[in-house]
Amino acid sequence: MLTVFSNDQLLHEGKSEFHRGQLLPCFESPKRAELILAELQANKSGDIIAPDRFGLEPVLRIHDAAYVEFLQTAFDRWHTIHPDCDALPHTWNMRGARDILPNNIYGQLGYYSCDASTPIMAHTWQAAKASADAAIMAQRLVMQGHRSAFALTRPPGHHATSNVYGGYCYLNNAAIAAQAFLDGDAKQVAILDIDYHHGNGTQIIFEDRNDVLVVSIHANPAEAYPYFLGYADETGTGAGKGYNLNLPLPDGTDWNSYQGALETALAAISRFTPDYLVVSLGVDTYAGDPISSFKLSSNDFSKLGHHLGKADFPTLILMEGGYAVDNIGCNVVKVLTGFED
Ligand code: Q9C
Ligand code: ZN
């Protein structure tokens, strides 16, 4: 399978994230992409090409202009006050307060974010934009007739909404790509999110729409990040009622229980008859993942890929999470080769 990746995506390299009471080295590191690339090359998985630059138009179909401008300028504003560290928020809005944009940089970091795990450094915007460009390039290839393509999107995207970043995500690559299909020749697009964490950003972006079916298999949010969305009773709102399906699974889930949820998800997608499928692939469902609790083995990722391929839609696979760096490349390659087998 063809892979799309830009070296600019390596430029985002946060120093630390706030994790369980401590500032720890960022789990979401450029190393992740380097290891995946190395394994794709070692397995002759297919050509790796750089994306074109698509400008802001496809990004602004999903994200608010003021949010994009904030992402473009936040580091410089922060850097004049704090030349030695990345920008991290420490104060957020509260229920009952006003939805108001303050002027102050600390206030704006809180306004536009949902956690303190997602630093903004000098090259964050450039890398996030390059990641979105990789998604759009792969989307174009699938729309032009490739049966599938892989966008090695890092930084990831599925926790970002139209105007909130968090969970290591700044631009919602899957949402941008789904919208690009609809702005092309598609009437309906399905997104299948199989990252360990619920894709709260993707759900919020599309929950009131019936042209994008969002299906997500993830850890029970009562016990796992992002905590405040991803429950089974969230089925869509307004015109989007019936077009959101959450399949939360308990801690310790292994392939035996995962497979049933995957079949349920793919059956719902087949009933929807999408023109294209976008897969938000996280390999943080792996047993060795440092921040997750599912128990998939490396071989299970081949089976997972095979199920995705059997569903037989023109498919864009893009990268979300997965932090067990020793096996991340192998696990991703198994999904992609499983898809083609
Ligand atoms: N400081 C993705 O897999 N952090 N994001 C949990 C750690 C957020 C994961 C607490 C995890 C986000 C794309
Ligand atoms: Zn994740």
Image: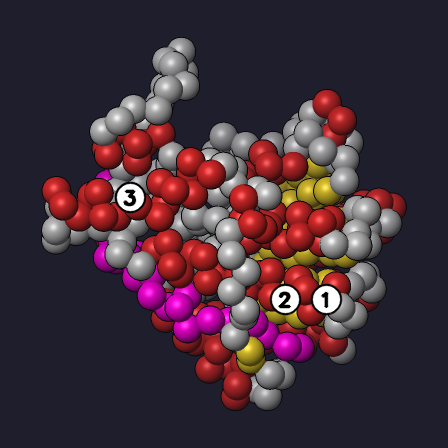
**Amino acid identity at mark 1:** Val
Depth order, front residue of 211/330: 211
Residue 8 at what x, y percent from top left? 40, 68
Against 125, residue 339 (above or below) is: below
Q: Which mark is residue 74?
A: 3
Up the image or down, 112 lies above or below 320; here it is above
Q: Amino acid at mark 3?
A: Ala
Q: Which residues are magenta?
A: 1-28
Position of the N terminus by quadrant = bottom right
Query: In the image, what residue type sits under mark 2?
Result: Ala
The residue tagged 2 is 138
x, y (%) of residue 24? 24, 53
Q: Is residue 92 above or below residue 40?
A: above
- Quadrant for the C terminus in the image: bottom right
Alpha carbons under labels 1 and 2: distance apart: 6 Å
Q: Check disc 1 and report the residue beneath it.
A: 142
Q: Is residue 200 visible?
A: yes
Q: Is residue 186 left or right of residue 102?
A: right
